[in-house]
Every structure is written in structure tokens, then in C-alpha cells.
């Protein structure tokens, strides 16, 4: 039986895995600078969490979730996104009661959505995201967006575009919702079935429809910015002012909606413009979700966050020809000649590894010439040469590959020599 990888998934092979490790380590580092702490949640949760947290009318819940019934007849779902799980953990573990507030968290891990696989869109994909819970200060909104932009910029990406909008408070959204219904209802039959179903359940989601994006009613739909309450307007102005003072460039787009029901107030996306990655593509997005904590059984707690795809990030880096400074080579390769030397080489390798060096040798009984070729393939900085003659003399030949220089070192002093001990 020829078993192949499931559609929409990928193997991350050696050579690529080091790039993943680099960007993930970069995420850890930048979150530490901004004082965000890592949280890890289960890969699957009770289905109701996503139905309530993400929204019954979203494409994710209606079309894309991997849901199954376990042996206990419980409906479980592989997580399609990270925020609902983090908020569930925040409520369940009563993090709202700890002294350090707001609670600033980050996560990275696989998510699962059943959708048509294409470049940068997988059925299993990895998200990095942050969540700040417990503060409704506009400075937190600015901080979250600044962290995301810093992350991309420090990896070397250019052509970044931060797009922001305000979805308003409950009062603003109610007025805008009525305006949208009045705008679309007379000609809703011209729209796709999804839009028709959303007209009275969640008309804001019509603006996010890709099928009917070119319809004329999309271009003159009522703007949320015209319906913002005084409080929402003031809040949005303060967010923009802080971004201005921080030197974080942005553009306002009143059609920016985001695809999840829990968003309100500030919403944003980061896009990449330029050749090689499409005319314009979204790298990440996020926003405020005040009310989600209460929806999942917790006390009234404001929140904001974002999520980004690691796959799309790596695609963007490749499209701009950015080489990550990853070193997959060895510090040391051991070339041995003779049975006794080969045995001693294994012992010496163990000592070198304990001393912190990346070290390897041949395990296929190859001739010395083939071993030297293997050392080159593995990009070894140093090649050690040990034969029966050297073993008898108690020394080993050390060849520094960059310079071609070679020296003899006493075997018992090898680890100390290679780690700079003398």
C-alpha cells in the first residue's frame, strides 16, 4: 500500500526545519522584550468553544472545522485558531485574578482548517499569536500592532503595510448593521447564498465576501466610520495618535472587517506589497474582542491580539530573497582509519558533544576519501583525522577547513583545545 501525506499538510524536512526554528526563536525573543509569556493549549477542544467563541456564522465554524466524536460521545474539534483556546484557558484557570495585569500571553502551534489547499493556505498550518487581556487602554492596541510590525521588520521584510479600522462599540455596530441591511436587502438576490444567509444574521460579514467583492454595492456600502459613537471615535483617534508618535506607519481602510465574529473596536491587518508574493497579500491580522471572555463564562474583560501564519512568513522571506542566518553545519567531523581508531573516535565524539560542540562521524564503514566528502557535505568547520598511527602516539590531527591549516593535538586535550580552553 502506497501511503502518502494527507492533502493540505506538509513535511518540514531538515534544511527547512532550521528556518522554522529561527523564526520561532525570534518570536520568543520579541515577546520577552514586550513582556508576553508563553501559553500552550490543547490541539483539540470541545466543539462548543469554537461555535461560541469564533461565531456560528463564520466560514470557519460552518465549513472548515475538523470535528469528530470521541469514544465518550463528546464532540471535539481540532483547533482552527488560537484565541478561543487562550481565552478559555484564561477563564478556566482564573488568570483574571492574578496580580499581574493585564495578562499578556503568546502561543505558537498547529491549527487545522478544512479548506482548498493553495500556496500559503494549508489544512494544517502553524500560527504565532499574542493576546493581551485585562486592559482597554489604546496604548495596548498600539503595542500589539507595533510588536507585529517589529517582528516582520527585524526579519528583514520590506513593503509592509499596516491597515487599520474601527468596528466600533455595541452602539456603533447596531447602527451600522441596520444601515448595511437597508443597503444590501433590495438587491441581495444578486449575491451569493452565503451573503444572503448573512444579511440578517451578520451583515458585516458580507463586506468580507470574496465571491461578490466586485459588486457595485460593495464599493458604496455604508462605512462603519460614519456610525462610530463619540466614545469609539475618540478611542480610535487615540490609537492612531499613539501609532503616529511611535513612528508606526499605517493606513485606514473602512472596509476592513476580519473574518471572526468576536472582533470589535480596533481591527487591523498587515499586508505585503510587491512582486513575487502577489499584488498584495495578508500576512497577519487581529484586533479587539471585548466581550469574548464573558461569552466563554468569565468576568467582563477586554482583550486584543493578533495571529500570523509561519508558512506565509517564510514564503514572504523567500519572495524577497532574504536568507535567514541559520547554520546547519557541524563544528567537527571525525575521520577515522582502522577499527581501533573508529572505536576511539566514537568515545571522543561523545566528549566533544558534552563540551557543547556539534559533532559527527561516518557510520557506514566508508573509505577516508568518502569520509572527507561527507565532512564537506555536512559543512564541518573542523575535520579531525584519527588513524591507528595517531592513536598509538596519543595525538589527533585537527584540520581547520576555512584556512586549510592543520595541527596535532594531544587526544586528552582535544575537547579543551576545540572549545578554547587553552
Image (cartoon, rainbow, N blue to C red):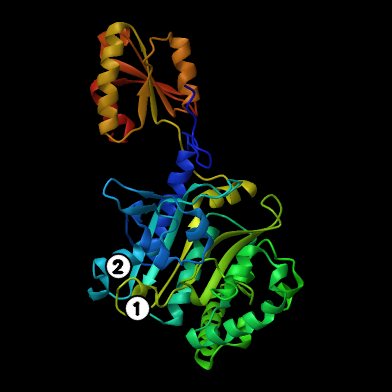
> Where residue 392 sits in the image (x, y, percent)?
26, 8
Badge 1 density bin: few <14, some 14–19, many ≥20, Cα 10 Å: some
Q: In this view, does 14 lie to the left or right of 409?
A: right
| Front residue of this view, candidates 12 and 342 | 12
> Where residue 376 sits in the image (x, y, percent)?
49, 23
**Whether residue 151 is situated above or below residue 199 in the rendered picture:** above
Counting the numbered discs, the total is 2
Numbered disc 2: secondary structure: helix
Residue 346: mark in rendering: none
Snapshot quadrant of residue 105: bottom left
Task: State whether residue 250 appears in this view.
Answer: yes
For the point 58% across and 48% down, the residue is 116
For the point 50% across and 44% down, the residue is 325
Q: Is residue 252 left or right of residue 174?
A: right
Numbered disc 1: secondary structure: loop
Residue 301: mark in rendering: 1
> Where residue 94 sits in the image (x, y, percent)?
24, 70
For the point 51% across and 49% down, the residue is 114
For the point 24% across and 66% down, the residue is 93
**What residue would you read off at disc 2?**
90
**Whether residue 50 is situated above or below residue 365 in the rendered picture:** below
The image quadrant where one finds the C terminus is top left
Do the residues under discs 1 and 2 have CB atoms within 8 angstroms?
Answer: yes
Amino acid at each position: 500500500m502506497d501511503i502518502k501525506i494527507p492533502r493540505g499538510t506538509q513535511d518540514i524536512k531538515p534544511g527547512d526545519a532550521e528556518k522554522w526554528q529561527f523564526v520561532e526563536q525570534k518570536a520568543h525573543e520579541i515577546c520577552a522584550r514586550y513582556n508576553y509569556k508563553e501559553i500552550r493549549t490543547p490541539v483539540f477542544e470541545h466543539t462548543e468553544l469554537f461555535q461560541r467563541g469564533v461565531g456560528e456564522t463564520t466560514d470557519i465554524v460552518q465549513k472548515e472545522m475538523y470535528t469528530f466524536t470521541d469514544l465518550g460521545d463528546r464532540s471535539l474539534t481540532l483547533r482552527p485558531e488560537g484565541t478561543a483556546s487562550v481565552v478559555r484557558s484564561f477563564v478556566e484557570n482564573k488568570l483574571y485574578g492574578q496580580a499581574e495585569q493585564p495578562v499578556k500571553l503568546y502561543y505558537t502551534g498547529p491549527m487545522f482548517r478544512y479548506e482548498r489547499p493553495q500556496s500559503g493556505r494549508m489544512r494544517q498550518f502553524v500560527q504565532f499569536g499574542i493576546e493581551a487581556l485585562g486592559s482597554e487602554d489604546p496604548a495596548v492596541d498600539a503595542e500589539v500592532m507595533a510588536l507585529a510590525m517589529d517582528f516582520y521588520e527585524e526579519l528583514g521584510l520590506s513593503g509592509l503595510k499596516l491597515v487599520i479600522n474601527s468596528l466600533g462599540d455595541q452602539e456603533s455596530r447596531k447602527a451600522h448593521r441596520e444601515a448595511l441591511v437597508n443597503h444590501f436587502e433590495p438587491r441581495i438576490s444578486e449575491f451569493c447564498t452565503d451573503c444572503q444567509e448573512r444579511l440578517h444574521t451578520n451583515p458585516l460579514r458580507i463586506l468580507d465576501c470574496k465571491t461578490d467583492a466586485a459588486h457595485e454595492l460593495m464599493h458604496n456600502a455604508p462605512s462603519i466610520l460614519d456610525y462610530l459613537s463619540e466614545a469609539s471615535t475618540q478611542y480610535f483617534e487615540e490609537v492612531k495618535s499613539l501609532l503616529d508618535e511611535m513612528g508606526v506607519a499605517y493606513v485606514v481602510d473602512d472596509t476592513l472587517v476580519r473574518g471572526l465574529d468576536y472582533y470589535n473596536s480596533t481591527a487591523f491587518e498587515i499586508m505585503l506589497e510587491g512582486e513575487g508574493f502577489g499584488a498584495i497579500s495578508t500576512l497577519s491580522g487581529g484586533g479587539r474582542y471585548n466581550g469574548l471572555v464573558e461569552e466563554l463564562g468569565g468576568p467582563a474583560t477586554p482583550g486584543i491580539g493578533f495571529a500570523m501564519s509561519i508558512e506565509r512568513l517564510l514564503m514572504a522571506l523567500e519572495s524577497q530573497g532574504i536568507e535567514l542566518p541559520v547554520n546547519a553545519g557541524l563544528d567537527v567531523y571525525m575521520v577515522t582509519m582502522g577499527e581501533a581508531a573508529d572505536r576511539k573516535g566514537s568515545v571522543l565524539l561523545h566528549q566533544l558533544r558534552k563540551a557543547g560542540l556539534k559533532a559527527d562521524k561516518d557510520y557506514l564503514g566508508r573509505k577516508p576519501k568518502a569520509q572527507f566528502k561527507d565532512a564537506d557535505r555536512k559543512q564541518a568547520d573542523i575535520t579531525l583525522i584519527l588513524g591507528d598511527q595517531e592513536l598509538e602516539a596519543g595525538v589527533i590531527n585537527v584540520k581547520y577547513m576555512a584556512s586549510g591549516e592543520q595541527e596535532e593535538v594531544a587526544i586528552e586535550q582535544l575537547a579543551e583545545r576545540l572549545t578554547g580552553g587553552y
